[in-house]
Amino acid sequence: MSLRVIAGSARGARLKAVPGDTTRPIMDRVKEALFSIIGDDIMGASMLDLFAGTGSVGIEALSRGAEQVHFVDRHRAALRTVRENLKHTRLEARAVLRQRDAFDVIKQPPERRFDFIYVAPPQYLGHWLAMLKALDRNPSWHHPESVVTVQIDPRELEDDICLRYLLEYDRRVYGRTMLLFFEFVDASKRIERNRTAR
């Protein structure tokens, strides 16, 4: 799969892929759709790119004007690839790289408030739902203006996603890729929304 930066200061730059099959690359048309949904809110924003892989999503955010992106991946090869891609796109000055397990990061209070949290773990291991539950359990991550986006294969979707403070507000399907969008809400407001929807 050919990876590239779609828009912004690094538009057209080709990105290296992580060797092996441990990552879940995002197709250009899905990435383009994602940032079309985010729109101008990416300008000056902060993003946490969990299970960063190639860093394609976070690098796209930086290219489009994000203030800072934190890339987290426990695999050394992935972080090496992200670093090379950042250097190639000349965006390393606004990037923070962490070779850590994403779940260990979420157990701790965030280093800063993130406007966007992107979750794209390896497929078919249930990590996406485990990560949502981990975020849901840690109140230090709960901020009403933070958006959590999860990238999965539609076949991974479970019928009942039981979360107390994270509320799904949108989902999009692009072939074999589904994007789920969540926001943090007060538990009482969630109950009220559910009543209104009935």
Image: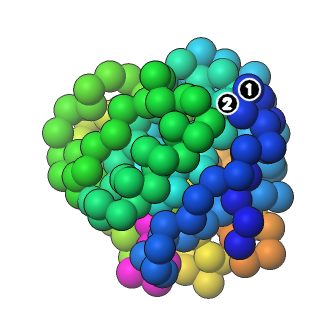
Which amino acid lies under the numbered mark 1 shown in the image of this protein?
Answer: Ser
Q: Residue at x 40, y 60 (%)?
A: 78
Q: Residue furthest top?
A: 44
| Residue 29 x, y percent position in the rendering | 82, 58
The image quarter in which residue 151 lies: bottom right
Placement of the N terminus among the 4 image quadrants = bottom right
Asked if disc 1 and disc 2 are in contact, CB closer than 8 Å, the reply is yes
> Is 32 on the left or on the right of 83, as rendered?
right
Kindly identify the amino acid type of the residue bearing the numbered disc 2. Answer: Ser
Q: Main secondary structure of the magenta part?
A: loop
Q: Which mark is residue 63?
A: 2
Q: Does the magenta segment cover residue 162?
A: no
Rate crowding at label 1 as few (under 14), some (14 to 19) or many (20 or more) other CA atoms within 10 Å: some
- How far apart are labels 1 and 2 at the CA level? 5 Å
Label 2 Cα neighbours within 10 Å, binned few <14 / some 14-19 / many ≥20 = many
Q: Is residue 162 left or right of residue 151?
A: left
Residue range (magenta): 121-125
- The answer to whether any part of residue 48 appears in the image is yes
- N-term mark: 1 or 2: 1
At 62% from the left and 36% from the top, the residue drawn is 89
Identify which residue is drawn at 70% across, 59% down. Answer: 3
| Residue 9 tag number | 1
User: In screen coordinates, is 63 left or right of 82?
Assistant: right
SS assignment at label 1: loop
Secondary structure beneath label 2: helix
